[in-house]
Image (spheres, rainbow, N blue to C red):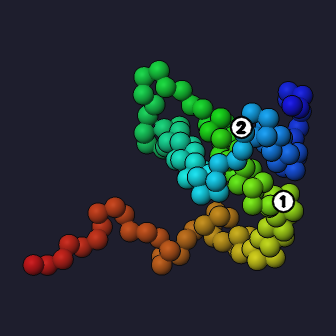
């Protein structure tokens, strides 16, 4: 395996995961099983996010493992990419180009992002402001 703390490219990460699977993991789980595992790992990441940045609190003795949960998500995503023949380096480059073409002006002109006040039509009603239906 690679030297600790070395920067890893996406392509290298895919190769390292594949090497680990063939050395220690016997074989990849099925694509559908890995999709279910990816969903589980995203849920574990969401749980940490809800506690660290949201309104929930950690249980006594529980600690934030956000980086570890993100790495678990990435691991399974790399597994799925490997077993489906996806080069994530190439796909990410294409995806960034697509987003740039599509969104290069949209976000710059979004008043919600650039600090300008939102128009009245964009402001959500305060919680509980909806009128109750009459009986």
Q: Which residue is mark 2?
A: 25
- Determine whether the residue tagged by mark 1 lies in a helix, strand or loop: loop
| Residue name at image x 42 percent, y 28 percent | 59
Label 2 residue SS? helix
Are the residues tagged 1 and 2 within 8 Å (C-beta)?
Answer: no
Comparing 80 with 108, the one in front is: 80
Q: Which residue is mark 1?
A: 87
Q: Position of residue 44 (x, y in %)?
A: 53, 42
Quadrant where the N terminus sits is top right
Above or below, 84 against 34 in this view is below
- Is 54 placed left or right of 113 in the picture? left
Look at the image and tell me in which quarter the C terminus lies: bottom left
Q: Residues within 10 Å of mark 1 (few under 14, many from 20)?
A: some
Left or right for 106, reference 64: right
Using the image, determine if residue 134 lies above or below residue 85: below
Nearer to us of marks 1 and 2 is 2
First in sequence: mark 1 or mark 2? 2
- Is residue 25 or residue 59 the one in the foreground? 25
Asked whether residue 81 is in view, the answer is: yes
Residue 30, given in percent of the width and then of the height, sits at 64, 53
């Amino acid at each position: 395996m690679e030297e600790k703390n070395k920067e890893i490219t996406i392509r290298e990460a895919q190769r390292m995961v594949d090497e680990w699977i063939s050395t220690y993991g016997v074989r990849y789980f099925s694509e559908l099983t890995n999709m279910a595992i990816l969903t589980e790992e995203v849920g574990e990441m969401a749980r940490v996010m809800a506690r660290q940045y949201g309104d929930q609190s950690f249980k006594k003795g529980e600690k934030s493992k956000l980086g570890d949960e993100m790495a678990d998500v990435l691991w399974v995503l790399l597994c799925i990419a490997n077993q489906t023949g996806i080069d994530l380096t190439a796909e990410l480059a294409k995806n960034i180009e697509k987003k740039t073409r599509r969104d290069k002006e949209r976000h710059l002109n979004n008043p919600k992002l650039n600090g300008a006040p939102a128009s009245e039509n964009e402001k959500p009603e305060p919680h509980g402001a909806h009128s109750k239906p009459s009986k």
